[in-house]
Amino acid sequence: MTPIQTDIPAKKKNIKASGIPAKKLLFPVIAVLSVLHLLIIVVILMVNSTSSQLSTIMQNAGNYTQDATSLLAGSSLLSETSSNYILMPITEKEENNVGPLMAYAQELQEDHRGPDVLARFKTYDVPPEAVERLALASDSAEFMKNSQLHAIALIRSVHPLPPIPELEAIPDFPLSQNELAMPEEDRIIAAHQLILGTEYGENKGSVSQNVNACIGILQSASSQRAAEAGRQLAILRSILWADTLSIIIILIITFVILFREIIQPLITFAQLIREGEALDETKGIQEVRLVAASYNDLRKRRDSLDAILRSAAETDALTNLPNRYRFEQFVLEAEESGYSVAVVLFDVNYLKQTNDNLGHLAGDKLLCRAAECISSCFGKNCFRFGGDEFAAIVVGCTPETMEKMTKKFEEMQKEKQVSISYGCAYTEDIGRTTFRKLLDEADHKMYAHKQKIHQMS
């Protein structure tokens, strides 16, 4: 008995596929996206820092301006209240005009005197020019304050003040012996001269001019710093937008690539698998192509196995001729009319005697020689029904053709040393009868022939 041959490999195939591996596609994308996200975090932190810096600049500019303005306001208030007292120390009711002095004393206790403001300004992050201007204003304000205290002392020497605790905040200005020796009227004139004189006016104008100049420098510096911070914010926002847009573009491109290289091929593969077709191994990334190659390899293996199983189901293992099942399939698939057909049935003689006397191996050899005779003479459509029975179907033949075939068959039996009974049924058009009728007719003739042979032996 000939063993069934198979073309299924014994070892697992090492299937390879071309294309870009997923890791080579995704790792750079992940790396770039990670860097871009890190950049976004850094830029956001820088934006927050710059915004805080800008807010601090604006707040400090306001505080510095307010501090400088307080020097001017305090100096003006001292000048005004002291002048009100010095020019009218006695009211119309012949009483001491202590009201202006009370306001003067209270203002002296505030911390926006020239030296106080200047000391704070030296600790501020301001341009040196602003400090220089404020120092000039502070010197002028101190000159005015000393002039005021000098004038107040002269007036008080003429019009002594009542003991009021609030007025104790006004420092005593020491008068010279010459001033104390002056007539009261001259002392009053000297006091007026101190606050109405040219030098006092110049210093008063200096305070205003230098404070305003200091404020201008502060505003200019803060504007420059704010503008620089604004430019940094604009640059950082541009970087942030560009970074975000880059991430969006990369994500879109990645999605398009993944759709084209993974999703779309898989959709196509699913349709082809449903239709039982082979997959295209040139589409998609390497892993997708590997799936396609693996599927195609499995499909080939399945087809090979199907062919083997079909062959095993339809082929007689001993003689390699189609079996009865294949004969029935042939009859079912044959057209119903329009051609001539001859059906020949065979029965191998003396098979039982050969098996009993010589063994089954000799009987198998006898059947194989019989199969060779039948297939050699009657063409490809020869079948083994089982046991010692065979059949042949000759399509598109004539009686003359069948006569030649049977004559050749008789000669080959002698050559192969085999005895085969046979019976033939022929029709010019299969549409006039059926295969079943032809089989019955051939069967009767075959058994008649077999009886004749046995009678002769």
Image (spheres, grey):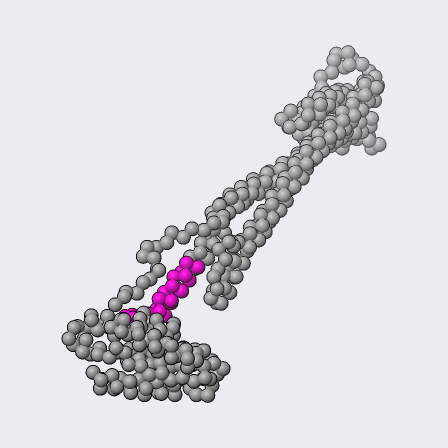
Task: Give the image quarter of residue 139.
Answer: top right
Please tell me which residue lies in front, 316 or 99.
Answer: 316
Task: Give the image quarter of residue 293.
Answer: bottom left
Please tell me which residue lies in front, 44 or 423.
Answer: 423
Please provide percent x and percent y for residue 372. 31, 71
Whether residue 152 sits left or right of residue 261 in the image: it is right
Magenta-drawn stretch contains 373: no
Please provide percent x and percent y for residue 71. 72, 28
Q: Which residue appears farthest toward the left when viewing the image?
A: 357
Above or below, 48 against 162 in this view is below
Residue placed at 32% from the left, 55% from the top? 11
Residue placed at 25% from the left, 77% from the top? 419
Residue placed at 35% from the left, 78% from the top? 406
Name the image quarter holding the N terminus.
Answer: bottom left
Please provide percent x and percent y for residue 317. 29, 70
Q: Which residue appears farthest toward the top when viewing the image?
A: 178
Per the picture, the main secondary structure of the magenta-coloured stretch is helix
Please tell me which residue lies in front, 269 or 66.
Answer: 269
Magenta range is: 296-319
Above or below, 40 against 126 in this view is below
Tell me if residue 142 can be seen: no
Magenta-drawn stretch contains 298: yes
